[in-house]
Image (spheres, rainbow, N blue to C red):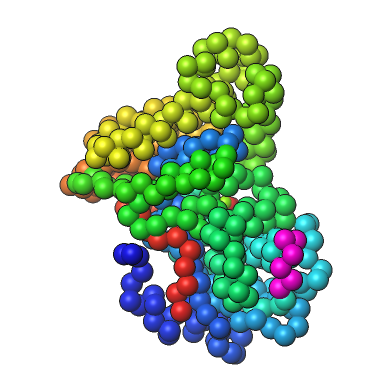
């Protein structure tokens, strides 16, 4: 399989190995990595048992690990200021760890909750996934650590089982009520494909991503509005209330054909939520059909409709993501939409290869004129999921 790892990455003298040595004074037993992701379409559907279509980006989080004979966890990240964090494995409990270290401690805790009595270790983290940019640096971190523990301790867990461990870690230990998309994407995506995932039964299919002359331009707006955490929980609760009112297990069970009638039966404040989830699930299925039929340009209008739905119905976009999407389209993108949970984060634009530069320039100029921070941009290629590097 053609994995997008450079020969440099597979070299035993991986840079993360050197950093581990300088922090801990010994050699790591190995280096593992897991990627961030973008989601092509299917936003806020994963906690409604719906469909998603993410792909892994080349940016990834690496972890170098050496097991210890005691129950000490020593954690160090190149992206975190400050000294090595030291924790006792036996003391780990939800709420007991604060700051970035909780994402790592969470995975150790979740594995132990599942009966894998793993002990202490020294871990060093390095990453080029921007944190808080809607590209899922948290899942990349969790999945890298889960994969490392699985290999080192011979736990024999499948990729899906590791994704569930990582999700449990984020839900119950970190305290973020996320769905399963980010962890499944980081664990299960493969190079050159998007992952069509049914979040109800975790059945998935790799959909080859043949974009021909098109590219996916990612625009990280570099804003994250404080609203995000509380709003997410409220939206989730709204979807659950709507499903209950409609007498279905989850909004996944509402077919597009029954949407109009279902909306009539709901209080006004729940209607836009239901309309988003039902139409978004349909957009994922349309996107898969278009890619399978060799029509990547057909994705453009789907991305644009998805953004309008997030902006007008689900109301999770913000001025910066709206500006990025609208400017990209005005400059010639075939379609654009916010990707990730919202209230900031990143926008993806489907752009013909020859126009990537001009669309990028148009977005940077519009952000400068509006007085926003300069966005970070890159072209995303569909990359490999979690793996051992050294
Ligand atoms: P996203 O997943 O969209 O990037 P989150 O808020 O879910 O945003 O997760 C970001 C958090 O994950 C950071 O604030 C930090 O605590 C943790 N994190 C991610 N990557 C790293 C890293 N390389 N080193 C330390 N902490 C990290
Ligand atoms: Mg996250």
Name the residue: 75% across, 61% down.
Answer: 113
- Residue at 78 percent across and 57 percent down: it is 95
Q: Is residue 75 above or below residue 162?
A: below
Residue 204 point in image, percent of width and height: 47, 46
Residue 12 visible (yes or no): yes
Question: Toward the viewer: 353 or 259?
Answer: 259
- Between residues 283 and 22, which one lies in front from this camera angle? 283
Left or right: 58, with 234 as reference point: left
Quadrant in which the N terminus is drawn: bottom left
Q: Position of residue 343 (x, y in %)?
A: 54, 39
Above-or-below relation of 5 to 316: below
- Observer-nearest of 138 and 321: 138
| Horizontal side, residue 311 vs residue 364: left or right | right
- For ligand 1, which image quadrant applies? bottom right
Q: Is residue 330 above or below residue 58?
A: above
Q: Residue furthest right?
A: 91
**Observer able to see residue 109:** no
> Is 93 displayed left or right of 147 in the figure?
right
Q: Position of residue 359 (x, y in %)?
A: 26, 42
Q: Is residue 24 left or right of residue 41?
A: right
Kindly report the secondary structure that dominates the magenta region of the rendered protein: loop
Residue 209 x %, y %: 31, 48
Numbered range of the magenta stretch: 113-118
Q: How many marks?
A: 0
Q: Does 219 lie within the magenta span?
A: no
The relative height of residue 266 versus residue 325 in the rendered view (above or below) is above
Between 361 and 299, which is closer to the camera in this rendering?
299
Measuring 24% from the left and 40% from the top, which residue is drawn there? 294
Q: Residue at x 39, y 49 (%)?
A: 206
Image quadrant assignment for residue 89: bottom right
């Amino acid at each position: 399989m053609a994995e997008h790892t450079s020969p440099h990455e597979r070299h035993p003298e991986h840079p993360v190995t050197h950093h581990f040595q300088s922090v801990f004074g010994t050699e790591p037993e190995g280096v593992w990595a897991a990627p961030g992701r973008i989601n092509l379409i299917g936003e806020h559907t994963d906690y409604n048992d719906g469909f998603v279509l993410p792909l892994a980006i080349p940016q990834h989080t690496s972890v170098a690990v050496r097991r210890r004979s005691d129950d000490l966890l020593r954690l160090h990240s190149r992206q975190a200021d400050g000294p090595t964090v030291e924790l006792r494995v036996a003391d780990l409990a939800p709420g007991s760890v604060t700051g970035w270290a909780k994402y790592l401690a969470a995975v150790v805790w979740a594995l132990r909750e599942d009966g894998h009595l793993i002990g202490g270790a020294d871990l060093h983290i390095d990453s080029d996934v921007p944190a808080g940019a809607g590209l899922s640096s948290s899942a990349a971190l969790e999945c890298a650590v889960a994969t490392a523990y699985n290999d080192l301790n011979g736990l024999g867990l499948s990729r899906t089982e590791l994704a569930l461990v990582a999700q449990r870690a984020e839900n119950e230990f970190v305290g973020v009520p996320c769905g399963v998309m980010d962890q499944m994407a980081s664990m299960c995506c493969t190079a050159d494909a998007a992952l069509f995932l049914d979040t109800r039964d975790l059945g998935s299919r790799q959909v080859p991503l043949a974009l021909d002359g098109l590219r996916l331009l990612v625009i990280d707006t570099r804003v994250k509005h404080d609203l995000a955490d509380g709003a997410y929980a409220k939206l989730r609760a709204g979807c659950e209330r709507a499903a209950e009112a409609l007498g279905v297990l989850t909004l996944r069970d509402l077919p597009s054909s029954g949407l109009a009638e279902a909306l009539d039966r709901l209080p006004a404040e729940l209607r836009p939520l239901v309309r988003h989830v039902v139409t978004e699930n349909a957009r994922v299925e349309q996107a898969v059909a278009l890619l399978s039929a060799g029509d990547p340009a057909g994705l453009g209008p789907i991305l644009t409709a998805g953004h309008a739905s997030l902006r007008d119905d689900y109301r999770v976009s913000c001025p910066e993501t709206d500006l990025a999407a609208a400017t990209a389209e005005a400059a010639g993108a075939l379609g654009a939409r916010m990707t990730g949970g919202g209230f900031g984060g990143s926008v993806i634009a489907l752009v013909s290869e020859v126009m990537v530069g001009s669309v990028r320039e148009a977005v940077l100029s519009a952000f400068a004129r509006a007085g926003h921070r300069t966005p970070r941009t890159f072209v995303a290629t569909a990359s490999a999921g979690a793996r051992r590097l050294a």
